[in-house]
């Protein structure tokens, strides 16, 4: 059986904003560094991240 594991944190490579997944709210919440509110965020999830857990 294959299980998908989504990321639990992400950081914008442009402005440094850090978000964390809140399971209770079922949404992303802004972490310590708020970054630029007008940034078109480029999240640090790349080819190294594998959402498939075996």
Image (tube, rainbow, N blue to C red):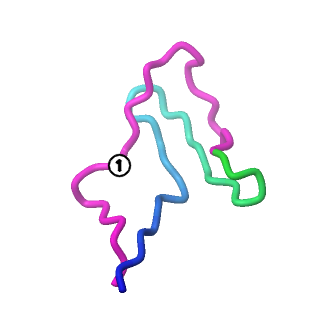
- Location of the N terminus (image quadrant): bottom left
Q: As displayed, is residue 24 above or below residue 36? A: below
Q: As displayed, is residue 52 above or below residue 54? A: above
Give the residue pinned by disc 1. Answer: 45
* In-image side of 30 versus 9 (left or right): right
Q: Which sits in the foreground, 47 or 2?
A: 2
**Residue 8 image point, x, y percent:** 54, 59
Question: Was residue 46 drawn as part of the magenta stretch in this picture?
Answer: yes
**Residue 16 image point, x, y percent:** 49, 34
Which structural element holds mark 1? Answer: loop
Q: Residue at x 35, y 49 (%)?
A: 45
Q: Which sits in the foreground, 54 or 45?
A: 54
Please give the range of residues in magenta.
Answer: 28-54
Hey, which residue is sitting farthest top in the picture?
38
**Residue 12 image point, x, y percent:** 45, 35
Q: Residue at x 56, y 19 (%)?
A: 36
Question: Was residue 22 drawn as part of the magenta stretch in this picture?
Answer: no
* In-image side of 28 versus 15 (left or right): right
Q: Residue at x 63, y 44 (%)?
A: 28
């Amino acid at each position: 059986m294959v299980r998908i594991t989504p990321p639990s944190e992400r950081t914008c490579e442009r402005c440094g904003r850090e978000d964390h997944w809140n399971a209770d709210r079922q949404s992303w919440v802004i972490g310590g560094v708020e970054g630029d509110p007008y940034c078109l965020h480029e999240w640090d999830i790349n080819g190294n991240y594998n959402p498939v857990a075996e």
